[in-house]
Image (cartoon, grey):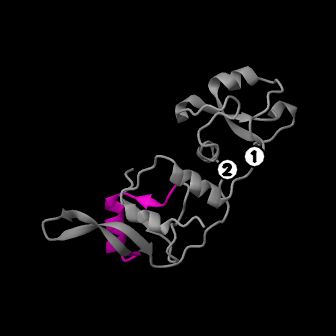
Amino acid sequence: MSADCLILNRDGRPLSFFPLSVVDWHSAIKLTLNRKVFVVKDHNDWVVRSPSMALNVPSIIMLSNYHHLKKEVKFSRSNVFSRDNYVCQYCGKKFPRNDLTLDHVIPISKGGDTSWENVTTSCKVCNNKKGNSDLKPLTTPKKPTLKHMMRSYLDSSYNFKDEEWTKYIDID
């Protein structure tokens, strides 16, 4: 799915951060025509046409009604990689996502669990080296805050479709 339009909650903040609440232009126009959202900003010079009308493609839309959000970061493979900045926590090298695995600091076989505090990012070589040894990660894994994850997200090489999106992604 393409990320053509940022969706904001009624309070002006993104509906979600991980993943960032975006939709393709088709969905953005459908939401607008169904009056479920207000258009905050259109893309410059992007118009779609039908036989009977021309419509500007929205860049930023806001929900008509407020949607209550959870304040915690969901535990997921992608979020662990993002928390650790795609860096193996054993050798300290940065890797592409496909070359990384999740590693249980305390193996499940020894009573460890699958949680923010016991799972870390590992390259495949280090994960095989570790096995059931006592190799320790360079940093102690911990549950990230939304602020930490947002900084990591903004510091990554993610390119927004419209630079104005950054005005609505408040990390302070």
Q: Is residue 18 magenta?
A: no
Image marks 2 and 1: residues in contact by CB distance under 8 Å: yes
Question: In the image shown, does 90 or 22 lie closer to the viewer?
Answer: 90
In this rendering, position of residue 88 left or right of residue 161: right
Mark 2 = which residue? 75
Q: Secondary structure at mark 2?
A: loop
x 61%, y 68%: residue: 69
Q: Is residue 26 magenta?
A: yes
Residue 53 percent location from the top left of the image:
16, 71
Residue 40: image quadrant is: bottom left
Count of number-bearing discs: 2
First reached walking from the N terminus: tag 2 or tag 1: 2
The amino acid sitting under disc 2 is Phe
Q: Position of residue 136 (x, y in %)?
A: 79, 32
Q: What is the number of the mark on residue 115?
A: 1
Q: Which residues are magenta?
A: 19-38
At mark 1, the secondary structure is loop
150 or 68, which is in the foreground?
150
Residue 43 image offset from top left, x and y in percent? 29, 65
Local crowd size for mark 1, using a 10 Å CA cut-off: few (<14), some (14–19), many (≥20): some
Q: Position of residue 14 (x, y in %)?
A: 51, 66
Which of the 4 image quadrants contains residue 90? top right
Quadrant assignment for the C terminus = bottom right
Q: CA distance from mark 2 to mark 1?
A: 7 Å
